[in-house]
Image: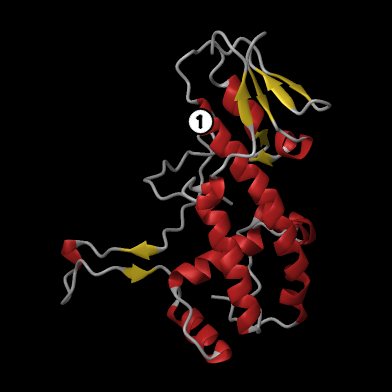
Amino acid sequence: ALISDRITDDSMVSNRTKERGYLFPLYLYPSAEAGGLHPSEREPNLAPWLLQELSHKYGFEPTPEEVLAYIYAVLYSPTYRQKYAEALRVDFPRVPFTADGALFRQLAALGQRLIDLHLLRSPELNPPVAKYQGTGSDKIEFVRYDPTTHRVAVNKDKYFEGITPEMWEYQIGGYQVLEKWLKDRKGKMDWDFQHYLRIATAIARTIELQSEIEALYPAVEHKVIPLPAK
């Protein structure tokens, strides 16, 4: 599960195999040809019965942003991913909605922090957890990680310090993010090391947040809202 605030290509999974990704915009904007009194007014891309059911159960009306953040938190729960691994390989994720409004808001808050981290707009990215050290050329000649020193060397003089094994091994889409980002820029000198530090920090904070989500997730399935299969 990924998040984007930009126009996204539908073959984002693989340009080589043209494997399709699935995009779920939070809002839909009716076209001018659709007519209506307010053709430019956006509508939440959520089933009306979902918001009605959640409002009835919680005693407050969740915003579409809160629903998205809650879903994002659930999708980043290690327990959820492991428990439904087989189903997730062949179908769209089915999201359990807790019957506890307070728990919903707790998870939505954690999910919003994840969203802000993954869009690299979170205040939690400062200061970065790692440093870019050394003197000399910035050219990426190789990518070598030393788990004992927590360093990622890009040449004989320059390296990143403060990259834990958990950060280095963290994967999205089957790739180790911190390794692949550098390897994709091998041979270049005009790359943005500050951007890499922000990515590393986002991963570190994501690992921390996943632990917090993991502590809360069992309570989600303790009592869920029965939703129609629509």
Outermost right residue: 148
**Above or below: residue 108 compared with residue 179:** below
Residue assigned mark 1? 194
One can see residue 80 in this view = no
Q: Residues within 10 Å of mark 1 (few under 14, many from 20)?
A: few
Q: Between 40 and 114, which is closer to the camera in this rendering? A: 114
Left or right: 27, with 38 as reference point: right
Residue 169, quarter of picture: top right
**Above or below: residue 78 compared with residue 155:** below
| Residue at 58% across, 81% down | 228
Tell me the SS state at disc 1.
helix
Q: Amino acid at mark 1?
A: Gln
**Above or below: residue 148 compared with residue 201:** above
| Residue at 44% across, 75% down | 63
Residue 88, quarter of picture: bottom right
Q: In the rendering, at what x and y percent does residue 104 appear?
A: 61, 76
| Residue at 50% across, 32% down | 195
Q: In the rendering, at what x and y percent does residue 33 appear?
A: 16, 63
